[in-house]
Image (cartoon, rainbow, N blue to C red):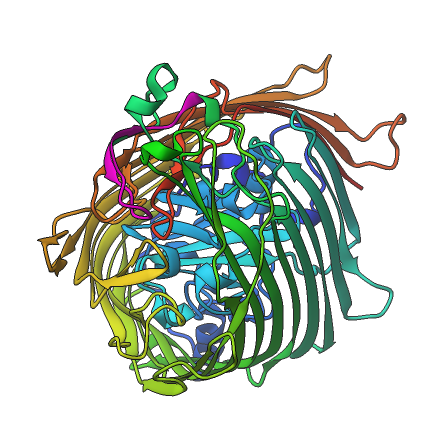
Amino acid sequence: MAGAGVPLFVAQAQAQTPSSSARPAANSLPPVTVDAPQKRTTARTTRPSNSQSSRIARASRTPRPSTTVETSPQSQGPQQGPATPLNTNVVTPSASRLGLTSREIPASVEVVGADTIREQGYHTTIDAVKGATGVTAGDAPNDVSFSMRGFQGNQVNVTYNGINIGPTGFTALTMETFNLDRVEFLKGPSSLMSGQGAVGGAINYVTKAPHTGPIQNEAFVGFDSFGSYRTGYGSGGSTNIKGLDYRFDISRSDVNGFINDTDARNLHVSGQLDYRLSESFKVFGAVEYKDYQAHPYEGTPLVPVAFSGPYATNGIVSGTKVSDYNPSNLGAVTIDSRTLTTNYNVLDNHKTIKETWARGGFEWNLTNDVTLRSQTYEYNASRDWYNNEVSAFNTDTTRVNNPIDRERFFVHHNQNTVGNSTDVTWNSRFFGMENRLVTGVEAYHLDFTRPGAANFPSDHVALVDPDRGYYGLLTTKRQTATIDSVAINLEDRLKITPTFALIGGLRYNPFELDRTSTDKFGASNAGFPYSASWQPVTGRIGYTWEALPGMTFYSQYATASDLSADSIFLLSPTQRLTLTTARSYETGVKNLLWNGRAEWTFSAFDIERDNVYSAQAGQTLNLAGKVKSQGVEFAAAVRPIPELKLWGNVAYVHARYADYDFTGGSFSGNAPPNIPALIVNGGASYRFLNPGWLPVEVGASVRHVGDRYTTDANTVTMLAYTTADAFAFVDIPKSKTFPTFDNTRVTFRVRNLTDKKYAAWSDPFYPDQIFLGAARTYEIETSFKF
């Protein structure tokens, strides 16, 4: 992966066995076996006969996804091929249907693999996402949000095994990572692959899949200094039935937050069966169940420096603010040191999410050159938020003892999505040049019901030690949305020479939105019901050029589109509901060198998104013109000696609004919220291979995130911060004492080593408060492979 946390850890022969979860762990750090590409011979050979030429041509083509690598949507398991320091050898179906590795795709593609997740201690998907170059994440009151390349929220798609289930702000769920094989990142506009919304990029979570071979098991249990625990068990391999492979994983966590009286419980069960009826035909079935229950943290209020006095903090926020919730002019603001762990949520708060998945399909090699794949899926979700979500300071002097305004928010989701994805891969020759064409059809039907609050109870509490109380009277109303979508995809790679290839694709994606909205009495609101339809065409075109052995240059032009509202429920029927258009220019280089012990990537991009709506306080949206974003990203990893691993990356982005004018002012030239100009990650580890003692590895990582703004007005800054983590683990090899386990690892970890106090995120819908970063945490974990 070209990103933080995916250094040479993946070089531990990650792809040399069928599954990272199935590999026995080494007792010592294995040598890197990747060889840098050698110079190609130019000597002519005797021309073979026609029949020989045909066979050689077929054998020399890039291997079909069905025979060498798993690229079908339904079988996105670990990929084969020698490991590289930044994981650019991994085939990423979410970035291309052509069965290409990330090094062969003309775009920035990163992969966080299972080994890296384990070694870096990425417990949750939020942790893993922060490990990517230039990506930040936050768990806002009602959603999980990400920022990437100058864009945030629903402008970054989240997919599951390549399936898009709807707007990120509605559907993204913080998960434990134990059930995942890897997390894939495709940077920049990518509607070609994941449909509407992928302007900043797409994040794909890939569940562990079956492998063919001996059964391997893994388990872990861990605890931290806040009294949290995590545990999991997984098993997979071949059964006694010829051709039948399985994978099963279950994980459970109960995590206590650093904010008082906050916690989250997470259960994730996943399983899959692969059955190969013949050498050319395979079927599969997969199911998943997720149960998330939390008492969440909803933010810490911004407070006037004049009010906090000696309790005003430095280094968290700065700037001045006029409250977006009440008319208070707060002046210079701070975070009061007495509120660093205060919970302003009501006592009966909750956030619950239950999800089920069912997927099934087949892969059929019709001929040596044609492969047909199909997957049908059903997704169901029930989501419920019941919280106090506004905590805004009020300067009203008559309420000096209760200066915090609070307001409740309730919403419930019932979502059902049914869909199918079918594609055909055809390998051929075009005027003697190798060509691979993938054509596909995707269709889905989404039903979305949203009972929401028709009233919003409110009250006032003290800043310090507030009387949290209860939610109060709840009156509901009802909104629904139905989306019917069909997409026709085409993607092609033409190898003009052995080192130069043209790669492009188109996506025609007509879809229709139907909405209803009723008041608390069940009567339709004005303008409802209504329907709208669109027919966007998006795509990309680019090239890859291996100018030198191991060094590949690339460039691409890509487009994307999404609903301008950013949410299918927030715009009223009288507002113009249309699509944004986004385009991107990108160029870069990917280089594997030093006999495979070092790798680096570089990219530069220019993105522009038109017809933008921007989130404002009170669940409203403003027309914000366009967003322009330019930046560069660089990542590198190296193993100078077998015991030492070094990695690091840096991302710089300049994102600004344009044509953002409104009555009384303009935000043109301002930065969108939550977008840091600079993100830097780095780390190192060293393994002590003392024959008289067990192998011990120690390491540390550092993360720096630059200044970010809380709102479009850019008056309050979440100040830059730097955090550091440290770890040490001991690998206990198989022995007479522990004959059952092939490997046991005991890990000690300290997060936020210096206990830095910082602002992690701000939700533009709740701009009177910010989310603090987690405090210092100590962890111990034991994992087993057997």
Instruction: Establish if 160 lies above or below 31.
Output: below
Where residue 238 appears, as percent x and y from the top left, is 79, 61
- Residue 124 in sight: yes
Where residue 613 appears, as percent x and y from the top left, is 26, 63
Horizontal side of 267 relative to 647 (left or right) equals right
Horizontal side of 546 relative to 273 (left or right) equals left
Horizontal side of 448 relative to 359 (left or right) equals left
Q: Quadrant of residue 735?
A: top right
Where residue 433 appears, as percent x and y from the top left, is 32, 75
User: Quadrant location of the N terminus?
Assistant: top left
User: Quadrant location of the C terminus?
Assistant: top right
Magenta run includes residue 324: yes
Magenta run includes residue 453: no
Tell me the magenta residue range.
320-337
Instruction: Establish if 636 lies above or below 139.
Output: above
What residue appears at the point 30 percent right and 55 percent down from the top-left corner?
Answer: 616
What residue appears at the point 22 percent right and 54 percent down from the top-left corner?
Answer: 587
